[in-house]
Amino acid sequence: MTDSLWKKDNAPTQDQGYTRTEAKREADYREALYRRGEYDPWTEESPSVSTQSRAEEHMTLLAAVRRYVEEKRNAGERGERHGWGEETYKRYKPTLERFAKDTTPSRSVTRLTETQIRSWVYREDLSHESKRTYYRMVSAFLAWLRENEIADLSMPPELETRSTVPSWASREQLAAVVSAWEDVCREDANRNSDPSVTFPAGTRWWMQAAWRLSFWQALRRSEVLKIRCGSVDLEGRSLLIGGDYVTKGKADATIPLVGPAAEIARDWGAGERPDGERLFGRSRADKVSRGFTEARDRAIQDGSLDPDCEITMHSLRHGRAIDLTKKGRHIVYVSQFLRHSSLDSTREYLQVVPRHLQQEMEDLDESPIAGE
């Protein structure tokens, strides 16, 4: 095809979202269609649907990943249930792009094999938890490929994907972390050269309130840090997760505000401060997580936690789920409280409390079927 053809307005360019390499590849592909008489750049803005379906057969894995993450991000901006929030987008995009670049970035996505998927997801340098996370990421991406009829790929069955209980923190472990954190903050205040810095004012002591609220309400780190004062209804005892701080592309959700959480919110000015203010200010999420790790390590050092304890701030959410399950709360209600999209996610916690499930089954008043 002559260069003059690609001076048309509908020629693929970087301004249209293509990288330089992708634009060249798309131009070459359209030129091949033109030579076969299947595409006319003077009358068509892009190849027809039937032709485009053939184009998707030649889509590279990296291009497919980029299209996928952008669709999920846009769905999240529209408030769709399975879309992504900005933080999820920032986490998933580099991971999936790394998956593409480590396997077959410049080859057709249809050339991807189960062996390549398995070797990337189950690398020896990954923890079991990371393998499970990568498995979920790649599984969702492959499902999208199938739904859009781009490639018929599925995750290979693997023993390593068996359901396991996530790392979880008990009430006692959280209490140990909070106690150790008080020691850390007091020492920080004593070391500070500014005489106006005292405990708890001027220290990081506020973080322990965020951790405790995270536990009681089973909140993710990003959720607890973005709570606005106006989202806390102390009289109605409810908490709104949503608005401009909704996470993971989910719709707004209102959950019950439990007693201890209500006291924490009241202590921090919910109901008195302006509705738009964040309950815990604007601290970065990574700082709060580092603080939790610091307090955990101090608790291990002073002997109040086991040396092999590896709980993180996210373990608090899992801990609350198990806490509720142990108390015999119905799995459906626990799932709604945690805002799980599927009961399958909630059922993982039942592995920790098999005796409670056994007791619940034994307590059923069931009559035999006629004839038994």
Image (spheres, rainbow, N blue to C red):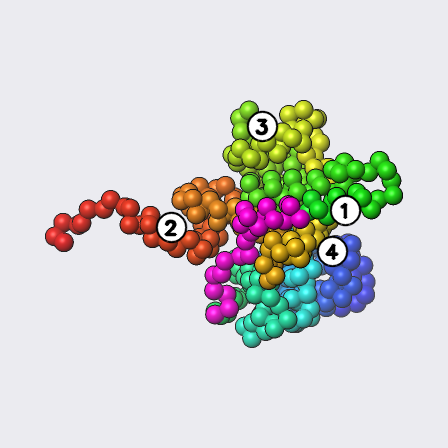
Is-magenta flag for residue 176? yes
- How far apart are the alpha carbons under marks 2 and 3? 33 Å
| Secondary structure under the numbered disc 4 in the rendered image | loop
Where 78 sits versus 30, above or below? above
- How far apart are the alpha carbons under marks 4 and 3? 44 Å
The amino acid at mark 3 is Asp
| Secondary structure under the numbered disc 1 in the rendered image | helix
Given this view, does label 2 or label 3 mark the residue nearer the observer? 2
Q: Which mark is residue 187?
A: 1
The 10 Å Cα crowd at callout 2, few under 14, some 14 to 19, many 20 or more, is some
Residue 58, by quadrant, is bottom right
Residue interval drawn in magenta? 159-180
Q: Which residue is mark 4?
A: 17
- Earlier sequence position, callout 4 versus callout 2: 4
Residue 344 position, x and y percent, is 45, 53
Q: Is residue 102 visible?
A: yes
Q: Is residue 48 visible?
A: no
Q: Which mark is residue 233?
A: 3
